Image (tube, rainbow, N blue to C red):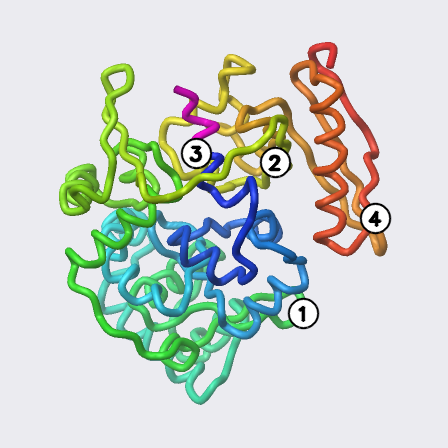
Amino acid sequence: MDLARRRLAVQHLIKPTLSDPAEVVRVLGAVQAQDYGGAKWALGMRTRGATDASIERAFADGSIIRTHVLRPTWHFVTPADIRWMLALTGPRVKATMGSYDRKLALDDAFFRRSNAAIVRALRDGNQLTRAEIGQVLHRAGIEVGGSQRLGHILLRPELDAIICSGPRRGKQFTYALLDERVPAAPAKSRDEALHELTRRYFATRGPATANDFAWWSGLTVADARRGTDMAGPALEREVIDDRTYWSDPSVRAPAWRSPKVFLLPNYDEFFIGHKDRSAIGRRLESARLVTGGDALIAYVIAVDGQLVGGWKRTLTNDSVGIDLRLLTRLSPAERRALDAAVKRHGQFLGRAAVVRSQLAVRGS
């Protein structure tokens, strides 16, 4: 079984049918957004007719929210999902960050003071940058310290569902009060939330294991297994090489003619959504491009779900320069598909895409 091709087919990459980037986020559950520009492109590849500008508008108007949820990193989520998802995964993130908080002398009493000062500063629609909130805290007599400490101070009210992203001010991100930014939504019980997250995960990343789901969600393996138990007949169970995989048989994955080439950004859900990424490294006999090391280099090229190299982009006023690093030989059809992928990225950005360099590491 080709796990990579099956996962590619359910990732809304082969033939995007959704025209609303917020709906893409909802279907995927959450989309890692640590690298904001890369995350916009991740949505752009999965949204029919999307441009960088249209996704920026969705972020600015609050259709898409960016906050720390699941693992302790940035994700895009929808307003309807942010509260129940934080309630489900926030306690685990807090526990994970506990030792770091203690090293920075941050305890519950401190967070009560800092949270209260942040709420006062953001009240009535006020939206502030990270640096501005740091100044607010300093004026309130709350020791901010260095960048790491301020980051932890801001993480806690995110996890407590007090603040979330506001619209960008130029290139700077702002914070807003969640209750002012996000409409009220019905609460879910923990079991309801776990069932919902389980369903969305396996519908868009299956076949996957409970360990994969636990890695992606930040929950325990026991929770992940409970989620698959609750999903019951809605999920299909398969055993491959002595591992149990789950998928959603109701998801109708499109067939396609090979080759399909994608310029994937770092942290793309196609690979970051699995703990075991070996399935996409078979052509190169390695998944090293998306495992370990500096994840910021993992702008990767995938052909039919298999890694074949890396890429990076350089933006100018009216163009985007693309540097390619191919690690295996491509067929003429694959090269044509790669050219089309480069052109598509330029169209998304509204700029001419120019291949500046092409390094062939293995005689490609």
User: What's under tag 1, amino acid-wise?
Assistant: Gly
Q: Which label's residue is closer to the chain start, 4 or 1?
A: 1
Q: Which label's residue is closer to the chain start, 2 or 3?
A: 3
For label 2, the SS is loop
Nearer to us of marks 2 and 3 is 3
User: What's under tag 4, amino acid-wise?
Assistant: Ala
Q: Which residue is mark 1?
A: 170
Q: Which label's residue is closer to the chain start, 3 or 1?
A: 3
Q: Quadrant of residue 55?
A: bottom right
Using the rendered image of the protein, determine whether residue 141 is visible from the camera's viewpoint. Answer: no
* Residue under the image location 49 percent in, 57 percent down: 147
Q: Which residue is mark 4?
A: 352
Q: Position of residue 306 (x, y in %)?
A: 54, 24
Q: Which residue is mark 3?
A: 7
Tell me how far mark 3 sits from mark 1, CA to CA: 36 Å
For label 4, the SS is strand
Is 168 situated left or right of 101 in this image? right
